[in-house]
Image (cartoon, grey):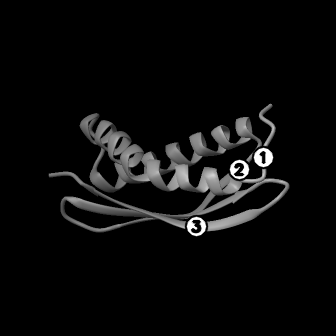
């Protein structure tokens, strides 16, 4: 396994914040194109990203847990928010993730 370093939580937090929007956009679009409605697509995409981030963190020696995932909106736009807890043996950080996906 990866040997976490002192900045692992900060580095992982920055990476998580930067990938949240594009990952959700891509996965939501794929699910929507497969025939799911907007809300179902956004919810499934968020859960998929949460699962992948947890596995990615484990491989790096950092725990990434997303909780309180919510999808709000109507029409052709959905906003997905989640609380991300990122920790290793040295530090813990809580950040809020938010992304808006437009289906039009």
* Closer to the camera in the image, 94 or 24: 94
Q: Where does label 3 land, which residue?
A: 95
- In the picture, which quadrant includes the N terminus? top right
Q: Is residue 64 above or below residue 78?
A: above
**SS of the residue at dot 3?**
strand
Q: Residue furthest right?
A: 89
Q: Is residue 18 left or right of residue 79?
A: right
Q: Residue furthest front?
A: 6
Q: Which residue sits at x=28%, y=49%?
A: 37
Could you tell which of marks 3 and 1 lies nearer the N-terminus?
Answer: 1
How many residues crowd mark 3 within 10 Å: few (<14), some (14–19), many (20+)? some
**SS of the residue at dot 1?**
loop
Dots 1 and 2: beta carbons under 8 Å?
yes
* Closer to the camera in the image, 67 or 22: 22
* Closer to the camera in the image, 17 or 81: 17
Q: Where does label 2 land, which residue?
A: 8
Q: Where does label 1 land, which residue?
A: 5
Dots 3 and 1: beta carbons under 8 Å?
no
Q: Is residue 12 left or right of residue 97?
A: right
**SS of the residue at dot 2?**
helix
Label placed on residue 89: none
Q: Which residue sits at x=62%, y=51%?
A: 11
Q: Which residue sits at x=66%, y=38%?
A: 55
**Image quadrant of residue 52?**
top right
The span from disc 3 to disc 1 (Cα, nearest Å) is 20 Å
Q: Is residue 40 above or below residue 80?
A: above
The span from disc 2 to disc 3 (Cα, nearest Å) is 15 Å
Could you tell which of marks 2 and 3 lies nearer the N-terminus?
Answer: 2
């Amino acid at each position: 396994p990866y040997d976490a370093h002192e900045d692992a939580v900060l580095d992982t937090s920055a990476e998580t914040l930067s990938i949240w929007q594009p990952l959700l956009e891509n996965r939501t679009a794929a699910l929507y194109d497969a025939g799911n409605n907007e809300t179902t697509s956004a919810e499934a995409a968020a859960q998929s990203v949460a699962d992948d981030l947890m596995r990615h963190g484990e491989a790096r020696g950092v725990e990434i847990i997303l909780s309180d995932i919510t999808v709000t909106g109507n029409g052709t736009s959905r906003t997905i928010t989640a609380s991300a807890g990122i920790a290793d043996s040295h530090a813990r950080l809580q950040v809020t993730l938010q992304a808006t996906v437009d289906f039009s």
